[in-house]
Amino acid sequence: MRRKESVLWSRAYRLLCWYPKEWRARYGDEFMELLVADLEERAHSLHRSLDIARGGLIARSASAGLGGQPLDPDDAPRRSLVAIGGALSIFVVFALAMWVQLTIGWQWSPPNTVGTSLAMFVMSAAIVAVGALLLAASVPIMWSVGRNLSRGRAGQLLPPLLLSVGGIAVLVVGTHHFANGWPGTGGHAWGRQGIVPGGVAAYAWASTLFVTSYWAHPDALGGFPAAEVAFMVVSPLAFATTLVGLAKVVRRLDLSPRVLRYEKRLTVAATVAMAAFFTGAGMWVFDGGPGPRNLFHIGAIDLIDLVAIALALVVAALAVRRVGAAAGQLSPG
Amino acid sequence: MPRSKPAKTAPPKADRGFSGFGRYAGPATLILSSLAEGPKHGYALTKDIERFADVRLAPGTLYEALSRLEGQGLIEAVQSDDRRRPYKLTAVGAEALRGHLDAQRRIADVGLRRLAGTWGPA
């Protein structure tokens, strides 16, 4: 009897884990009671599991500042910044993976259609803009980290900071190593005929090796060097670790209203740049020309990239609206 | 019995209290109707709604609606030592429910009248 009860509680607890920490702190106890009673009546229900998963994801979106529900006004801007940062990071990964194919193609031969050429220029400009904006956004954040650390908040900030530094280190070392094997021109006489320097393209290619349709073809993947496959597995984990660490750092920082307003302006600009990239990528996909020697052909992975970029764009746009509303309520700093 | 009467300065539109509920308007109506009888915790709400509406609200849907209703001030949690926290209707919630049900009744009346006119009485 006691064993059955404990099984029910552990099942209820697993279902509760769909919800964010703050939600669990508020509703956790009563929700567990309801779940246990429900599990006693209906041991197995796919509808219940799906309903809880959906509810948990909605609660997590709301907690990230993406839902329609009001957030704690003190915390809202930071949450929205984290949501935008997450969306921007996802965008950067999939955008780089898409863009790098064009850069590789162009190293060998320019595209033979106006659509693909124009797409390449738009996507490249958008990538440069997003990179510059990320750099500009990180300066006051790093300054705030330094100031918070000097005020004795190392205990709170150092663990997530070290987590993200560890993730970045794995990404940098792996990218540097595998960039040597990129399928560009290498030392070929035709090298550097693209509009993007080969080195930049090589690093972008190596850092996004895991965004590939080879996952759907394990036999072909088996022919890859073991170290490369290992990096393809480890790099998304390192990427996630970096993201989680940075999100925790930003959530724990004391950011002045002035910094928040500055970040708000940058996030608006970054969202516009994301939209520009999406437009460029769409032009390439719809232009669809395989180009000379099939260098610019569209694959299934590009459509997946495009969907991921669209989702990131939607999340960023929602969060920008929230951070704008939250920053608008801040007193001048 | 509410302790204070809601302010009459801005008479609420029929569904003012249900604005922004979207797909949760249905569960919200059921929950508020159940709480109109008195405070109830989550499981008691589920069972009561199942009894009077023949609808079983899944736990995720129930708590999504409860948190929205609480956020809009239509219901509030009752202090309790029990882990199963009960909820009660607020005066604003009672007013919103009344307005919503009145609007639903007007729609139902029109529909039934037109049905009777065209298709004959039931």
Image (cartoon, coloured by chain):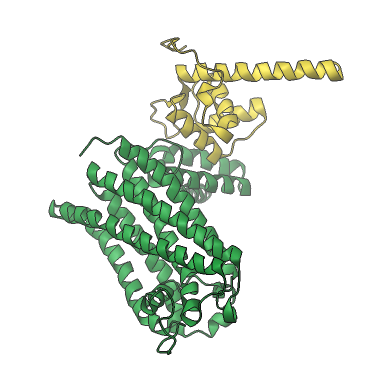
Chain colours: A green, B yellow
Q: Residue at x 30, y 49 (%)?
A: A263
Pick the residue in front: B38 or A127. A127
Q: Position of residue A233 (x, y in %)?
A: 45, 73
Instruction: Specify whether A259 is left or right of A101.
Output: left
Q: Residue furthest right?
A: B120
Q: Residue at x 31, y 41 (%)?
A: A75
Q: Position of residue A10 (x, y in %)?
A: 48, 51
Q: Quadrant of the C terminus of chain A?
A: top left
Count of labels in the image? 0
Q: Position of residue A310 (x, y in %)?
A: 51, 55
Whether residue A87 can be seen here: no
Q: Position of residue A68 (x, y in %)?
A: 46, 37
Q: Vertically, is A323 above or below A199?
A: above
Q: Vertically, is B94 above or below A245?
A: above
Pick the residue in front: B63 or A127. A127
Whether residue A333 can be seen here: yes
Q: Vertically, is A196 above or below A82?
A: below
Pick the residue in front: A118 or A47. A118
Q: Vertically, is A157 above or below A330?
A: below
Pick the residue in front: A183 or B116. A183
Instruction: Specify whether A261 is left or right of A12.
Output: left
